[in-house]
Amino acid sequence: MGAGFPLWRDSVPSNADSTLWELSDELAANLSSWQEDFDYNYDPVTGWPSMESLSRHFQKAVSLKERVELELPSNAVELDYWQTIVDGKEEPFPPHT
């Protein structure tokens, strides 16, 4: 089961659904797709199946953060990316382009 929409507000204790954000339908769908990728491919014990999976997901996170900043310019947007385990081993953050 998925964890829901991948954006949080400090004032909301759990993640909210996409309707609580003033985002374009396209960005909301992209964020949901990114979350589904995590739900499907990230194992809570062993992490990502490969460095390629981690890198792909992290790159998408950086891109989505930039898009959220553009659509919500009056909000502070922080990327809290913690999913860096690959095949049971903690890995450094992949470089982003």
Image: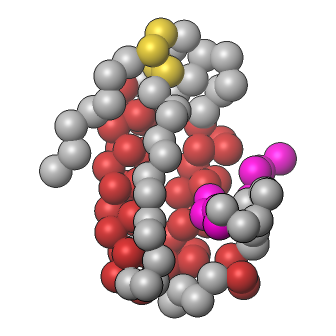
Q: Quadrant of residue 33?
A: bottom right
Where residue 15 appears, as percent x and y from the top left, is 73, 60
Q: Residue at x 38, y 75 (%)?
A: 69
Where residue 76 appears, as percent x and y from the top left, is 44, 69
- What secondary structure prevails in the magenta region? loop
Q: Residue at x 65, y 42 (%)?
A: 40
Q: How many marks?
A: 0
Is 8 colored magenta in this rendering? yes
Front position in the image: 27 or 65: 65
Q: Residue at x 51, y 27 (%)?
A: 48
Is 33 colored magenta in this rendering? no
Q: Is residue 32 left or right of residue 11?
A: left
The residue furthest front is 11
Q: Quadrant of residue 29?
A: bottom right
- The answer to whether residue 40 is above or below residue 18 is above
Query: Which region shows up in magenta?
Result: 1-9
Where residue 58 appears, as percent x and y from the top left, is 38, 44
- The answer to whether residue 14 is above or below residue 85 is below
- The answer to whether residue 60 is above or below residue 47 is below
